[in-house]
Image (spheres, rainbow, N blue to C red):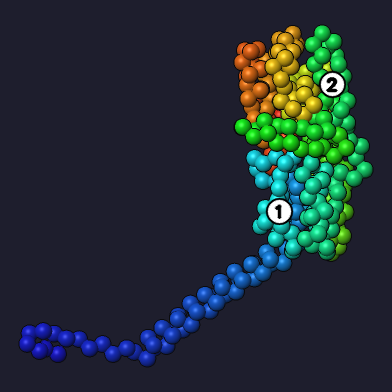
């Protein structure tokens, strides 16, 4: 139609257009509802997973090797924090109210907190993964150097009451009965911990017993392989000494016939006279590397390293990627004692 030179077109929608348009809109609606329901189901499945707590990150690795994604694993001691002095957050205590299992391992903060953790949720099972493990004493020392009185040996560890220099803050903690808690740094002892974890998960989810058993056996095989690899990495290093600030590696040293020499003396940062002894000892033994860890101050380690023209290397006993970390640490020890 022509009105004043303008041409107007009036388009009438064909009934078929309306029909297919409605069909398309209906299809989009169905797709939207399906996506929404799928998301809801996924959320529901995630929420239906039992929650288990562990004290430290390496335990998370152990549990996940056996449980896969059938449980949600929460870690009490966050990265960078010390399991010696950790205090659970209010939010973590609230999470424990819906927790099925708490896997304890014998680290110092558990001594003060485990009863309170259990009290939050009487239905929660407390599983002590260190049960049946004969721990090394923190008090035993082999005095191989009578001139300097340096504390050394496979069982060089903290004393009963330790004070750690973390920046300007002195932190005191107590190791339970003077025993070394670092049992997760021995593949042989992790085999025993894994068996306890597998049994507890099977009790929690009996329908998944076959799955847990298969994963447990596969993990045990990887642990056996790791132990062989570590022995190969450290072959020919029997009796060699490595110097650390905090004596976390006693079980590792014991397994692979090394000698751990800690800078801490009876769990405390060394006095000036003790530092001099350590420096003389390091020079005599040709030690060029001091091993520190992220959870502690490197002040004393750096001082010793400077005096011996050496270096400080950080190794983390609490790294989450446990298996790769163990091999990496073994290689660093090997390179340091060549």
- Can residue 157 be seen in this snapshot? yes
Image side of residue 156 versus residue 165, left or right = right
Which residue corresponds to the image point at 68% horizontal and 34% vertical from the top-left?
A: 170
Q: Is residue 174 above or below residue 31?
A: above
Which residue corresponds to the image point at 45% horizontal and 81% vertical from the top-left?
A: 25
Q: Is residue 127 above or below residue 223?
A: below
Instruction: Tell me how many marks there are.
Output: 2
> Which residue was labeled with disc 1?
74
> Which residue was labeled with disc 2?
153
Which residue corresponds to the image point at 74% horizontal and 13% vertical from the top-left?
A: 277
Near mark 1 (Cα within 10 A), the count class, few <14, some 14-19 or many ≥20, is many
Which residue corresponds to the image point at 60% horizontal and 74% vertical from the top-left?
A: 37
Res 56 quadrant in image: top right
The spot of residue 300 in percent (x, y) is 66, 23
The spot of residue 331 in percent (x, y) is 71, 26
Gap in Å between the C-alphas at discs 1 and 2? Answer: 35 Å
User: Considering the image in quadrants, where does the N terminus appear?
Assistant: bottom left
Q: Is residue 214 above or below residue 248?
A: below
Image side of residue 15 versus residue 180, left or right = left
């Amino acid at each position: 139609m022509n009105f004043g030179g303008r041409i107007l077109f009036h388009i009438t929608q064909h009934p078929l257009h309306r029909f297919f348009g409605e069909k398309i809109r209906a299809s989009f609606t169905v797709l939207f509802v399906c996506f929404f329901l799928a998301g809801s189901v996924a959320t529901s499945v995630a929420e239906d997973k039992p929650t288990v707590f562990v004290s430290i990150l390496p335990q998370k690795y152990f549990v996940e090797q056996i449980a896969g994604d059938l449980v949600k694993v929460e870690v009490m001691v966050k990265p960078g924090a010390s399991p010696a002095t950790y205090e659970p957050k209010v939010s973590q205590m609230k999470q424990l109210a819906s927790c099925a299992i708490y896997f304890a391992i014998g680290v110092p903060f558990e001594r003060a907190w485990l009863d309170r953790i259990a009290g939050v949720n009487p239905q929660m099972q407390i599983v002590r993964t260190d049960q049946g493990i004969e721990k090394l004493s923190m008090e035993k020392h082999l005095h191989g150097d009578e001139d300097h009185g340096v504390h050394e040996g496979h069982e060089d560890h903290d004393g009963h009451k330790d004070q750690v220099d973390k920046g300007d803050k002195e932190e005191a903690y107590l190791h339970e009965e003077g025993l070394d808690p670092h049992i997760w740094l021995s593949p042989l002892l992790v085999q025993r911990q894994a068996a306890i974890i597998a049994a507890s998960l099977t009790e929690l989810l009996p329908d998944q017993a076959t799955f847990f058993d298969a994963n447990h056996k596969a993990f045990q095989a990887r642990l056996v392989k790791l132990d062989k690899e570590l022995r190969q990495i450290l072959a020919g290093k029997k009796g060699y000494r490595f110097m650390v600030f905090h004596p976390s590696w006693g079980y590792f040293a014991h397994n692979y016939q090394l000698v751990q020499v800690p800078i801490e003396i009876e769990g405390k940062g060394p006095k000036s006279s003790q530092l001099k002894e350590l420096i003389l000892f390091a020079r005599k033994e040709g030690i060029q590397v001091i091993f520190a860890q992220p959870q502690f101050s490197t002040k004393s380690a750096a001082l010793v390293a400077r005096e011996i023209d050496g270096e400080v290397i950080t190794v983390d006993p609490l790294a989450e990627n446990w298996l790769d970390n163990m091999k990496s640490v073994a290689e660093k020890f090997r390179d340091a004692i060549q």
